[in-house]
Image (tube, rainbow, N blue to C red):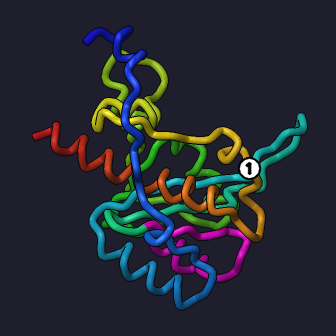
Amino acid sequence: MSRAELGTVELPVYQGVSLAQVTLVLTEDLAAKAQAELMAAEAIGFDTESKPTFQKGEVSTGPHLVQLATDSHAYLFPVSRTHGNAALKAILEAPRVLKVGFGLGNDRSALKSRLGVTLENVLDLGEVLRGPGHRGTVGAKVAVAHFFGQKFQKSKKTGTSNWASPRLTERQVLYAANDAYVALQLYRAWLRTQG
């Protein structure tokens, strides 16, 4: 099938994680549980969300949410809360746990300035998947279509919503959780091609 024909084919929707597989880390107990599970993994999905800036010259105060995922569960850490920041720092700085995600270029400096986190052992799939001689990066949507033959739905409205809000909507929770979860699933799919 040609690339033009592929563009007209309606791919099945990528399902991702359900709400039951997502924990919003709002207490120290939940942070400890998340830390134990995430630190036991050799690789985890990773992403961040920030409240968008709309005014010229406005400086972002993000990231406001950090998402981490195992193969079966996603953990969302709201950065504005005091709960869980020590656990989050320990996970992100753990050299033996690989953090995989897409478009992680700004995350390193933003996490350093906002939380004092020095990100360790990170793999940006957007860079890895683009291949030699190509410019730009590959995004999760393209990678899901390539590896899984499915459509990764991402709402622009949700993506540009207020991630600093003290109460995230169900749509925001699923959007954020699946960004981290799909990165880990794509990493595993990519690894199988490296054989």
Q: Which residue is identified by label 1?
A: 161
Observer-nearest residue: 50 or 21? 21
Q: Position of residue 162 (x, y in %)?
A: 76, 54
Observer-nearest residue: 46 or 89? 46
Observer-nearest residue: 167 or 180? 167
Observer-nearest residue: 106 or 189? 189
Please indicate whether residue 185 sits to the left or right of residue 81 in the image: left
Q: Position of residue 138 (x, y in %)?
A: 43, 30
| Residue 1 in which image quadrant | top left
Q: From what the image shows, is residue 192 above or below residue 37?
A: above
Q: Is residue 38 magenta?
A: no
Q: Residue at x 41, y 34 (%)?
A: 127
| Residue 192 in which image quadrant | top left
Q: Residue at x 60, y 44 (%)?
A: 106
Which three-letter amino acid code belongs to the residue tagged 1? Ser
Q: From what the image shows, is residue 13 above or below residue 76?
A: above
Q: Secondary structure at mark 1?
A: loop
Q: Give, as a single range, the part of the protein colored magenta.
A: 74-91
Please indicate whether residue 65 sits to the left or right of residue 62 in the image: left
